[in-house]
Image: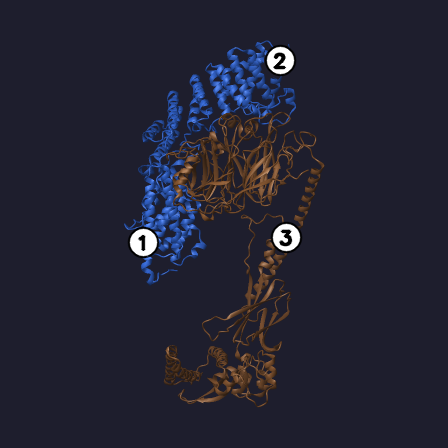
């Protein structure tokens, strides 16, 4: 049997419907050769199917939510969001007139994306043609001489009935005939921002009783249906049948399906209609109603003009489908036959054709189901109900056209076939023809091929269900695990955060050493993570080490650059230790800019552990749509617990080859192997070449001194350095964190020659001196720390490191409450004045440097250097 | 935290404030133009545009940090926005409460007291904001205006506890704390606005007066059924001076209802006359007058009132355009259908008139009125005259039946038959599709509820009409059909009135000398009377009550006696 495939004919492209698949606001209507189309934006297009061209484009002040065509009166009603209902006359003459009028100056909207269409001027709709201004309107339908609207009131949906306004009428008071509140439940909470577009709009459908005097001329292009008498009476009661009144069916976004008899919706001005009397709730779909329609499931006895539908259908967004038919029980009494089906969802749009087919579009394809009872005409034993009852199961047939956002069954169809007008999510207008010869119009016999297919479908259904069960089970397990992990994390966090004083249960100590990595000496930091708490650090924990290079520490303008290393802590039980080493430098360029700050923290990534459990990958779930977005954790969401921070300065980075500390390379950092070779081959005694050596030879080294009172130092260093001279003790204290500290201690040195990371030498000399003039009581014993280096930058780094240590020392001592001896204030004042004078001079010299030419700037620079030198050797004393 | 404007930008700041102010004033003027417009569509559009303008202005004001200098304008814009919004929506919505809340938070923001937001509900915010405003007197007028709107909102949502607290705080400096809300409202004196203040749609004093009236009316309304509360009487003179005419009609009618129920019909009549003199809406007082005359037993006057009511409701009145202010009516709940202020639609009034005529024995008038009513209902061309003859009224089939009963009563049997046939033909598809013999039907225990009692009643009336026309055979066939349907109904539905029909059938059979059938029916009826007779107080529908009038109750007893004596034959 030939696989029924629709013949798809592409007509034109329009701009993408606003909101994509979830919006549900685009509309297509068809009248003769004219197609009226809105994509959910501000434009309404009129397209000529035969001429294959765009006839007109109307622009409205807001998003277009609904279109209704009154073919008999040639009137198009348009609901514009936040504005109201507009009424356009489709008279050819008025259109051309208004187009001519606009032709001159009007601009063409360039981004409307009409593909291959001749430019058509956009006609801006006159605000005067708004026949019902009401910002709260969400849906409407037109019935003969009545206009039925649904507005979102403060707490309820409100249905109003008006006399139908016509275009071009004088704006006179529109007679409101009736009004009734629909549901007492609060509408979706999108009323806050009036501009926020609701996800789902209510759906309205007019149902007329048979033989009502006003034929619904627009019955198929719009949403009116004519029901057969029994179904009509059964659904809406004897009153509606007696009054021969049309009924408005209303599907709300909360799933409620209710109806209002139009002829009873008459209210006096003093009071609203009584919802209990006027509104009848038919059903509750428990998901947003996206479509209400009616169809004919039983073949008609004879050819009649009006088709009286015998089955009412309502579709919910997630595919829940309700079908109601009238049937008779054994006693001959009229009873409703009501069936609920579950179709694949989410349903984007749906339509019914003249026979028993319901078409509905999902993101995976256009499906068709047949509500006629299969097999019953020939084989009554197979059907489980009375003849003509609804099928117990529906078998959706996927026609394979994805993501149609709106459908319309074309009214001009050759007998037996179906022709659908559809707009895709990408804005393509197309015709889908279902050939009656391809598709068996009456699937009267269950062929073996078809039965096989059904069985296959059922089996695959069972397969998918079991797959789904296992995937759900997995998700539950995952969630359990995630909860356990979270509990552990909470424990660890509490332990760490609550122990402010004393040793922390989880600590990280950082030390530095020089070591040799790939022909290069590198300063290596070693971080030792110790877990002395009672909890174990499991998967998900990571040790984050941030290395903040104050590469431009001397250049105050720029901030240092930070590098973060993240090392997963894979299982660290109580009492466990983990050592992590990382190179601090020098890098490729041979530079190591000290000081470097190393900070350690523990990080627990919530995303990795919890995030996965919260959004289990379920292949059966709908693609994430607006209303079921997964819980999104930001990329970096997690728990961060700082552990320790350590600053590596110049005093820690110094190496001392003169002391016999292993130092293989004469000039530390990476060198070209050829250079190294040449260096070793150099004739002993010859002059070393290169700028460094030249500078060392011709430039006197820069010097900086700091004086500290001996008393202060002694008090600070305490007993640990007893037995050695104060000078030696001071040097040991300064180099305490250096690898050479033991040798310095052993040799009792008071001066030492070191090498900076970049290879220049740094000389530290400690002397004991006496400072006179400062104290009236006599000379003060002091220690002078002198730093010498041929590299000014290294001098500064070393000086900075020493000052940093002294600062800490002074602060500690001050905390202990030691009082300085009496001072001669006048002397201090004098020194301060000297310094200020020097600083001022520096300022003026620098200013001058900027303006002067090269010759005189040389002299100025010399002077500046002198002043700097004087500033570096202050006669001030740290007490 | 107070944000001080940098000195350098103060010049531009002032001009910005002026611009905003000018925008507010312009929008208020636009709304007032809209209010005066005689074209409703134009009016609606202008008002909607003004609302959008105010929304935009509010957005730009609230996009900047709050400052004391801009706050009076900002609060005024909020007040104007809420006033217009509530007016266009014809009610207060929850998001208006959020607008008020945001205004209060902005006041607190200038004082660095935003933590109040987290701790308290809206009431706590008001407390904090009013305390702040004692330090910033320039905020007071606008804040009182906003408080008025809050009071209106709480009044419509029945949050009287919060409302009392708010009013106590507002009036605390002016009078001693009181629990009585009317007194509180009366003693609340909103500070007068400066002459150069930004324009408002409605000032705080006006709003207070509206609140006072609305509260008095609200208090009076539920008291009505019980009797006049002192408060209602006390507050009426005050309320009346501010009442719009339509509300005045309501108040007078409500007073009339109260006085009628309290047993002072003459005083009630005076108020109803006053209500009618007020003019615009005649429905409620006329309906109330008919009730009053019914109570007095003056049928002629009652019917006349109802006739006037029908006439009054036939005039399509263009609803008065609402003022774009907070009006008293906006703060009152709409009268529900059970309220004495609800007069229904023209067709409902017509039905009331027809049924009262039938009940009081004016059969000819009743028949005419019923025929008018049916014509009104079934003529589809004018949907605006269609009725909701919903509860408490009868459903449409019952209306047909009452019409038929009235026609029979008036001696127009042929017309009655036409009405009945119309009813049956229009509902034919609801009737059982495959009628069975009653023996079959009796075996069934599960019965459909769709075989309505009114279908059998139709046959009963048809039978009665044939009797009137002297066609006994047709009468018998209709009565049998009636019984067939009745016996198919559940025992619960077998009511007293239907038994009367059975007896009537029995009598007819006897007269026709169809003895066997009569005896069979008699036995069945005897069996039925042994069933427990419950629900004797059940009142019959009007159409059956009318039928019952035709069958004299002694008939049954004599029939029974006759049969008991002759039954063995």
Q: Residue reaching furthest left? A: B195
Tell me if residue A209 comes above or below residue B119 in the rendering.
above
Q: Which residue is mark 3?
A: A475
Mark 3 Cα shell of 10 Å, populated few (<14), some (14-19), many (≥20): some
- In this view, the residue in front, B175 or A473, is A473
Using the rendered image of the protein, determine whether residue B8 is visible from the camera's viewpoint. yes
Give a yes or no on whether discs 2 and 3 share a subunit.
no
Subunit bearing disc 3: A
Q: Chain of mark 1?
A: B
Q: Distance from label 3 to label 1 (Cα)?
A: 61 Å
Same chain assignment for discs 3 and 1: no
Marks 3, 1: nearer the viewer: 1
Q: Is residue A151 above or below residue B491?
A: below
* Position in image of residue A495 (x %, y %): 57, 65
Residue B168 can be seen, yes or no: no
Provide the letter of the chain coloured blue. B
For label 2, count other residues whose C-alpha is less than 10 Å away and answer few (under 14), some (14-19) or many (20+): few
Determine the secondary structure under disc 1: helix
Answer left or right for A571 relative to A598: right
Q: Which mark is residue A515?
A: none
Is residue A783 depicted above or below A443 in this figure? below
Count neighbours of disc 1 (C-alpha within 10 A) and say few if under 14, some if 14 to 19, many if 20 or more. Answer: some
* Chain appearing in brown on the rendered image: A
- State yes or no: discs 2 and 1 in contact (Cβ < 8 Å): no
Q: Quadrant of the C terminus of chain A?
A: bottom left
Query: Helix, strand or loop at disc 2?
Result: helix
Residue at horizontal 60%, vertical 64%?
Answer: A541
Of labels 2 and 3, the one closer to you:
3
Q: As rendered, which of A641 and A33 lies closer to the eye?
A: A33
Residue indicated by mark 1: B18
The answer to which of B173 and B423 lies nearer the viewer is B423
Q: What chain is tagged by disc 2? A: B
């Amino acid at each position: 049997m030939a696989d029924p495939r629709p013949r798809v004919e592409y007509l034109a492209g329009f701009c993408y419907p606003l909101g994509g698949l979830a919006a549900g606001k685009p509309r297509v209507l068809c009248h003769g050769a004219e197609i009226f189309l809105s994509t959910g934006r501000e434009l309404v297009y009129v397209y000529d199917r035969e001429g294959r061209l765009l006839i007109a484009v109307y622009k409205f002040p807001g998003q277009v939510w609904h279109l209704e065509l009154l073919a008999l009166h040639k009137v198009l009603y348009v609901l514009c969001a936040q504005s109201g209902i507009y009424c356009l006359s489709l008279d050819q003459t008025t259109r051309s007139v208004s187009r001519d009028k606009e032709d001159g100056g009007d601009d063409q909207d360039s981004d409307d994306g009409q593909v291959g269409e001749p430019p058509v001027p956009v006609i801006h709709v006159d605000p005067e043609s708004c026949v019902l201004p009401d910002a709260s309107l969400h849906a409407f339908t037109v019935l003969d001489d009545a206009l039925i609207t649904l507005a979102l009131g403060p707490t309820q949906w409100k249905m109003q009935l008006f006399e139908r306004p016509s275009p071009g009428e004088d704006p006179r008071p529109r007679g409101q005939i009736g009004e009734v509140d629909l549901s007492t439940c609060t509408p979706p909470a999108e009323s806050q921002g009036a501009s926020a577009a609701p996800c789902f709009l209510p759906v309205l459908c007019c149902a007329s009783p048979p033989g009502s005097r006003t034929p619904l001329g627009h019955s198929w292009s719009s949403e009116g249906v004519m029901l057969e008498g029994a179904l009509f009476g059964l659904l809406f009661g004897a009153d509606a049948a007696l009054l021969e009144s049309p009924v408005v069916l209303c599907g709300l976004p909360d799933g409620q399906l209710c109806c209002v008899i139009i002829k009873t919706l008459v209210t006096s001005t003093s009071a609203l209609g009584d919802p209990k009397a006027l509104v009848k709730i038919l059903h509750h779909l428990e998901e947003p109603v996206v479509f209400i329609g009616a169809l004919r499931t039983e073949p008609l006895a004879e050819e009649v003009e009006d088709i009286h539908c015998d089955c009412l259908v309502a579709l919910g967004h997630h595919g829940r489908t309700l079908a109601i038919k009238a049937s008779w029980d054994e006693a001959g009494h009229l009873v409703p036959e009501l069936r609920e089906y579950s179709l694949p969802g989410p349903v984007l749009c749906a339509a019914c054709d003249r026979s028993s087919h319901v078409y509905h579009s999902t993101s995976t394809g256009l499906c068709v189901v047949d509500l006629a009872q299969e097999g019953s005409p020939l084989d009554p034993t197979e059907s489980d109900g009375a003849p003509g009852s609804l099928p117990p199961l529906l078998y959706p047939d996927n026609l394979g056209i994805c993501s149609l956002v709106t459908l319309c069954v074309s009214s001009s169809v050759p007998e037996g076939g179906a022709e659908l007008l559809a707009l895709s999510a990408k804005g393509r207008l197309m015709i889908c023809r279902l050939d009656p010869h391809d598709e068996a119009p009456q699937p009267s016999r269950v062929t073996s091929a078809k039965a096989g297919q059904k069985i296959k479908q059922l089996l695959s259904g069972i397969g998918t269900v079991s797959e789904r069960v296992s995937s759900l089970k997995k998700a539950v397990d995952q969630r359990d695990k995630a909860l356990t992990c979270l509990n552990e994390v909470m424990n660890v966090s509490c332990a760490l955060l609550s122990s402010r004083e004393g040793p922390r249960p989880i600590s990280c100590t950082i030390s530095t050493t020089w070591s040799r990595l790939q022909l290069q000496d590198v300063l290596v930091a070693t971080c030792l993570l110790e877990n002395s708490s009672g909890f174990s650090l499991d998967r998900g924990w990571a040790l984050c080490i941030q290395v903040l290079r104050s590469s431009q520490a001397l250049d105050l303008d720029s901030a240092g650059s930070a590098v973060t290393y993240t090392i997963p802590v894979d299982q660290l039980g109580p009492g466990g230790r983990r050592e992590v080493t990382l190179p601090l430098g020098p890098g490729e360029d041979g530079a190591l800019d000290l000081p470097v700050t190393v900070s350690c923290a523990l990080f627990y990534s919530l995303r990795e552990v919890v995030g996965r459990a919260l959004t289990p990958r379920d292949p059966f779930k709908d693609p994430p749509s607006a209303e079921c977005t997964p819980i999104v954790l930001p990329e970096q969401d997690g728990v961060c617990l700082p552990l320790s921070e350590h600053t590596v300065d110049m005093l820690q980075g110094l190496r001392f080859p003169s002391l016999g500390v292993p130092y293989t390379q004469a000039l530390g950092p990476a060198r070209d192997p050829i250079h190294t070779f040449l260096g070793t081959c150099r004739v002993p005694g010859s002059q070393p070449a290169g700028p460094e050596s030249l500078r060392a030879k011709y430039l006197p080294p820069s010097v900086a001194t700091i004086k500290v009172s001996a008393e202060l130092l002694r008090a600070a260093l305490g007993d640990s350095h007893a037995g050695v001279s104060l000078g030696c003790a001071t040097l040991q204290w300064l180099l305490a964190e250096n690898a050479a500290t033991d040798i310095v201690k052993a040799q009792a040195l008071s001066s030492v020659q070191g090498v900076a990371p970049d290879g220049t030498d740094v000389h530290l000399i400690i002397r004991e001196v006496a400072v006179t003039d400062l104290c009236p009581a006599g000379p003060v014993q002091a220690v002078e720390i002198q730093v010498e280096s041929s590299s000014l930058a290294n001098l500064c780094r070393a000086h900075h490191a020493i000052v940093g240590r002294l600062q800490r020392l002074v602060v500690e001592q001050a905390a202990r409450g030691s009082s300085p001896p009496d001072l001669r204030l006048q002397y201090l004042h004098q020194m301060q004045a000297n310094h200020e004078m020097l600083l001022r001079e520096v300022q003026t010299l620098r200013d001058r440097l900027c303006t002067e030419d090269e010759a005189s700037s040389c002299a100025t620079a010399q002077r500046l250097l002198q002043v700097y030198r004087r500033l570096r050797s202050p006669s001030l004393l740290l007490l | 935290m107070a944000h001080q404007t940098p000195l350098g930008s103060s010049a531009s700041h002032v001009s910005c404030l002026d611009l905003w102010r000018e925008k507010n004033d312009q929008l208020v003027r636009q709304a007032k133009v809209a209010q005066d417009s005689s074209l409703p569509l134009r009016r609606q559009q202008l008002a909607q545009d003004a609302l959008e303008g105010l929304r935009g202005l509010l957005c730009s004001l609230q996009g900047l940090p709050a400052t004391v200098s801009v706050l009076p304008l900002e609060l005024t814009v909020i007040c104007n926005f809420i006033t217009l919004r509530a007016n266009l929506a014809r009610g207060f919505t929850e998001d208006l409460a959020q607008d008020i809340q945001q205004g209060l938070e902005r006041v607190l923001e200038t004082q660095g007291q935003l933590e109040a937001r987290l701790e308290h509900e809206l009431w706590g915010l008001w407390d904090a904001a009013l305390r702040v405003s004692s330090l910033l007197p320039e905020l007071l007028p606008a804040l009182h205006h906003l408080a008025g709107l809050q009071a209106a909102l709480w009044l419509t949502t029945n949050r009287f506890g919060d409302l009392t607290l708010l009013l106590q705080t507002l009036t605390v400096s002016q009078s001693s704390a009181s629990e009585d809300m009317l007194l509180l409202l009366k003693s609340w004196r909103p500070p007068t606005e400066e002459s150069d203040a930004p324009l408002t749609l409605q000032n705080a004093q006006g709003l207070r007066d509206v609140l006072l009236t609305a509260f008095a009316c609200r208090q009076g309304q539920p008291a009505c059924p019980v009797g006049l509360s002192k408060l209602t009487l006390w507050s009426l003179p005050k309320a009346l001076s501010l009442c719009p005419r339509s509300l005045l009609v309501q108040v007078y009618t409500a007073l009339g209802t109260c006085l009628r129920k309290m047993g002072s019909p003459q005083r009630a009549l005076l108020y109803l006359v006053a209500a009618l003199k007020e003019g615009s809406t005649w429905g409620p007082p006329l309906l109330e007058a008919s009730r009053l005359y019914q109570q007095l037993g003056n049928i002629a006057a009652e019917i006349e009132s109802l006739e006037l009511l029908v006439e009054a409701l036939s005039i399509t009145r263009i609803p008065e355009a609402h003022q774009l202010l907070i009006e008293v009516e906006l703060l009152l709940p709409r009268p529900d259908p059970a309220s004495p202020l609800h007069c229904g639609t023209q067709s409902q009034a017509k039905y009331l008139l027809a049924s009262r005529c039938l009940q009081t024995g004016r059969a000819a008038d009743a028949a005419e009125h019923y025929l008018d009513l049916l014509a009104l209902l079934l003529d589809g061309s004018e949907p605006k005259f269609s009725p909701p003859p919903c509860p408490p009224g009868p459903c449409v089939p019952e209306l047909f039946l009452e019409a038929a009963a009235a026609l029979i009563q008036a001696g127009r049997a042929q017309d009655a038959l036409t009405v009945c046939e119309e009813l049956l033909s229009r509902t034919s598809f609801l009737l059982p599709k495959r009628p069975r013999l009653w023996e079959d039907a009796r075996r069934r225990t599960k019965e459909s509820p769709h075989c309505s009692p009114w279908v059998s009643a139709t046959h009963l009336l048809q039978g009665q009409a044939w009797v009137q026309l002297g066609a006994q055979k047709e009468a018998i066939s209709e009565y049998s059909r009636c019984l067939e349907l009745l016996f198919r109904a559940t025992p619960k539905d077998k009511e007293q009135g239907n038994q009367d029909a059975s007896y009537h059938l029995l009598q007819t059979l006897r007269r026709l000398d169809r003895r066997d059938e009569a005896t069979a029916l008699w036995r069945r009826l005897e069996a039925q009377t042994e069933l427990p007779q419950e629900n004797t107080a059940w009142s019959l529908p009007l159409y059956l009550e009318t039928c019952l009038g035709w069958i004299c109750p002694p008939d049954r007893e004599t029939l029974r006696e006759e049969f008991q004596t002759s039954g063995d034959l």
